[in-house]
């Protein structure tokens, strides 16, 4: 099993930045991909970004492309989501997730059901 703990959320004003972290423990050698999802008030959970654990093949939702950057430091077993130019509509609980399943490099993992382990979430609130 893999345990995930997110951190870095908070309250910011529109236009500001935040960096979320996702620390993995347990069977980290089994991680193949990491994804970030978010769930705003009254909304369904949605895909934000994903990365292969070797650092290649990033994927972003259109809503965050050009503003968010996903990365990972495999030596620290930690993934990151750098969020720039935040907007009020980015307000949500942000979750990281990982999967041990191996997919082709070109395959996109944008659905919650494709991930095996989840963190507890960290709240991001962007005021206007």
Image (cartoon, grey):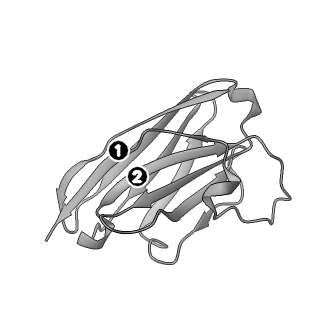
> Quick check: 16 left or right of 78?
left
- Quadrant assignment for the C terminus: bottom left
Residue toward you, 61 or 40 = 40
In the image, what residue occupies the spot 29% across and 72% down?
89
Considering every residue shown, the one lying at the far top of the view is 26
For mark 2, give the secondary structure: strand
In the picture, the disc for residue 84 is none
Among the two numbered marks 2 and 1 on one chain, the one whose residue lies closer to the N terminus: 2
Total label count?
Answer: 2
- Quadrant assignment for the N terminus: top right
> Quick check: 76 left or right of 11?
right
Kindly report the distance in space between the C-alpha atoms of the residues bearing marks 2 and 1.
5 Å
In the picture, the disc for residue 94 is 2
Query: Where residue 115 sits in the image (x, y, percent)?
Result: 66, 49
In the image, what residue occupies the spot 70% across and 24% down?
27
Q: Which residue is mark 1?
A: 122
Q: Are marks 2 and 1 in contact (CB under 8 Å)?
A: yes
In the image, what residue occupies the spot 44% across and 63% down?
68
Badge 2 crowding class, 10 Å Cα cut-off, few under 14, some 14 to 19, many 20 or more, is: many
Specify the quadrant of the image occupied by residue 84.
bottom left
81 above or below 31?
A: below
Badge 1 crowding class, 10 Å Cα cut-off, few under 14, some 14 to 19, many 20 or more, is: many
Considering every residue shown, the one lying at the far bottom of the view is 62
Specify the quadrant of the image occupied by residue 54.
top right
Specify the quadrant of the image occupied by residue 57.
bottom right
For mark 1, give the secondary structure: strand
In the image, what residue occupies the spot 32% across and 41% down?
8
> Quick check: 11 left or right of 34?
left
Query: Where residue 96 sits in the image (x, y, percent)?
Result: 51, 46
Query: Where residue 122 sits in the image (x, y, percent)?
Result: 35, 44
């Amino acid at each position: 099993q893999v345990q995930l703990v997110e951190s870095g959320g908070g309250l910011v004003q529109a236009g500001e930045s935040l960096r979320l972290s996702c620390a993995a423990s347990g069977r980290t050698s089994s991680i193949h991909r990491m994804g970030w999802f978010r769930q705003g008030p009254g909304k369904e959970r949605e895909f934000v970004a994903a990365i292969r654990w070797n650092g290649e093949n990033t994927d972003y939702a259109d809503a965050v492309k050009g503003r968010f950057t996903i990365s990972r430091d495999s030596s620290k077993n930690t993934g990151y989501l750098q969020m720039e130019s935040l907007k009020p509509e980015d307000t949500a609980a942000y979750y990281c997730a990982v999967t041990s399943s191996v997919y082709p490099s070109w395959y996109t993992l944008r659905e919650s059901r494709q991930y095996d382990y989840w963190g507890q979430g960290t709240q991001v609130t962007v005021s206007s």
